[in-house]
Amino acid sequence: MNPIRRPFRYHYDNVVLYVIGINVVVFVLQQIFPPLSRYLALNPVLVYNGWVWQFITYMFAHGGISHLVFNMLALFIFGSQVERRMGSGEFLLYYMITGLLAGGFSFLVYLFTGSYGVFLLGASGAIFAVQLAYAAFFPDSVVYIWGILPLRAPIMVLGFTAIELFSSVFGLRSGVAHLTHLAGFAWGWVYFLARFGTNPWRSFTRR
């Protein structure tokens, strides 16, 4: 068996709740010690000078209460189902790898475009990957956007991705890490291809 595709033994330990708890604790610490954000957020200059832990810590820090709440709500809604389907070990690996690689991609973009003053924080890159996984595993599920607009999960994910792509090209909603979101989506897709040997598009288009 290809070692990359060797499955973990299935177990379900509510890892999503632990991840949410860590994010909440980190946010509280950010409010108590504001300089902490500088150490946790991903900045290309600081990473280049050895602060490599920021590739991981950036996805556990947030820029405000609404940023935290929306990300954690999405993680709870979609991540709980994905974890139950994948198993906790696989889910944690998926979450961390896609978040790490999304941050790495953003770092390279910021570095080569001269965006040295950017401080990237938030779990959105990994959460976009989680939403992709949810749509791939549950393509027939219906998600109600704003509680009223019903969309099949694949349509929701592809719609969000299109919005992020459009926003990144035309510079809309400045201050939002569109490229990090897109990178999370893309790395999630690569993970499915490499780890599971499946193309999410086939699930999206299944009838």
Image (tube, grey):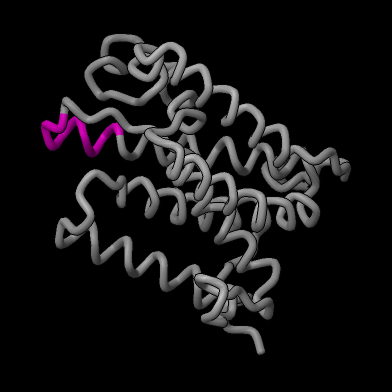
Q: Which residue is pictured at 58% across the width and 67% down the height?
A: 199
Q: Which residues are magenta?
A: 107-115
198 shown above or below 12: below
Query: Is 37 on the left-hand or right-hand side of 90?
Result: left
Q: Position of residue 68 (x, y in %)?
A: 49, 40
Q: Residue furthest bottom?
A: 207
Q: Which residue is pictured at 53% across the width and 49% down the height?
A: 127
Query: In which quadrant will I find the C terminus?
Result: bottom right
Asked if the stretch drawn in magenta spans residue 108, the answer is yes
The number of callouts visible is 0
141 shown above or below 78: below
Q: Which residue is pictured at 71% across the width and 32% down the height?
A: 18
Q: Position of residue 55 (x, y in %)?
A: 43, 26
Q: Position of residue 72 (x, y in %)?
A: 57, 45
Q: Which residue is pictured at 41% across the width and 19% down the height?
A: 40
Asked if the stretch drawn in magenta spans residue 192, the answer is no
Residue 71 or 91: which is nearer the viewer? 71
